[in-house]
Image (cartoon, rainbow, N blue to C red):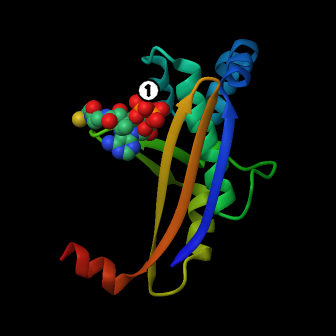
C-alpha cells in the first residue's frame, strides 16, 4: 500500500544564490557530508544540491510533516547506488515519523526519483508499505 507521496520543484539559481550568500553555513545545515562530497566534485554543484534539496522537501511531504521549524534536514538524505540510482535514507525524527505511519506487520520503503533541467530540479518521493511476509518472501 502507498503511505505517502511528495513532490518538489527547486530553482537551481535560487540554490546557487543561497550557496553564494551563506556558503558553508547553508551546506552544513542542510546537507550531509556524503551529499556535500558528491555535489562538490560535480561540474554542476548547485544543480546537485538543488536535486537533494527537492528530495528533502518531497520526502517531508510524503512523511506528511512538511518542513516544520526545528527539524533536521540532514535526517533525510540521498545517496546513490553504483548505477547512479538515488536512495533516500532517513534518520532521527524522519525515521520515527516513518515508523509511526507504517502499519503493524509492514515494512516501509521510500522510493525517490530526481531530475534536473536548468534552472529546475525536481524530486518525487513515494513511501510504500509491504507486509513483512512479502518482504521476507522476496528476499528468501
Ligand atoms: C539515468 C539517466 C537516464 C539519467 O538521465 P539524465 O538526463 O542524464 O539526468 P536527469 O537530470 O534526468 O537525472 C539525473 C538523476 O537521475 C538519477 N539516476 C541516475 N542514474 C539512475 C539509475 N540508474 N536509475 C534511476 N535513477 C538514476 C540520479 O538521481 C541523478 O541525479 P544525481 O546523480 O544528482 O543523484 C542516464 O544517466 C542514463 O541513461 N544512464 C545510463 C546508465 C549509466 O550510464 N550508468 C553509469 C553507471 S553504471
- Which of the 4 image quadrants contains residue 41? top left
Residue position for label 1: 38
Question: Is the CB of the residue bearing disc 1 within 8 angstroms of ligand 1?
Answer: yes
Q: Nearer the viewer, residue 18 or 72?
A: 18
- Residue 74 visible in the snapshot: no
Going by the picture, which residue comes out furthest to the front?
117
Q: Image point 43% across, 26% down: which residue?
A: 38
Q: Quadrant of residue 37?
A: top left
The spot of residue 29 in percent (x, y) is 67, 33
Where does the C terminus fall, quadrant-wise? bottom left
Write the residue at 65% across / 43% down. Answer: 73
Residue 97, position as x, y percentages in the image: 63, 67
Asked whether residue 14 appears in the rendered view, the answer is yes
Q: Secondary structure at mark 1?
A: helix
Q: Quadrant of ligand 1?
A: top left
Image quadrant in which you'd find residue 122: top right
Amino acid at each position: 500500500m502507498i503511505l505517502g507521496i511528495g513532490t518538489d520543484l527547486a530553482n537551481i539559481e535560487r540554490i546557487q544564490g543561497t550557496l553564494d550568500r551563506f556558503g558553508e553555513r547553508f551546506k552544513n545545515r542542510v546537507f550531509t557530508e556524503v551529499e556535500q562530497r558528491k555535489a562538490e566534485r560535480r561540474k554542476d554543484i548547485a544543480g546537485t544540491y538543488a536535486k537533494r534539496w527537492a528530495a528533502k522537501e518531497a520526502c517531508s511531504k510524503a512523511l506528511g510533516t512538511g518542513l516544520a521549524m526545528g527539524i533536521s534536514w540532514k535526517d533525510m538524505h540521498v545517496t546513490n547506488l553504483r548505477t547512479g540510482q538515488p536512495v533516500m535514507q532517513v534518520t532521527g525524527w524522519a525515521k520515527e515519523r516513518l515508523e509511526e505511519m507504517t502499519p503493524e506487520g509492514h515494512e516501509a520503503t521510500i522510493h525517490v526519483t530526481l531530475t534536473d533541467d536548468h534552472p529546475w530540479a525536481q524530486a518525487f518521493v513515494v513511501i510504500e508499505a509491504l507486509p513483512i511476509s512479502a518482504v521476507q518472501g522476496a528476499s528468501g
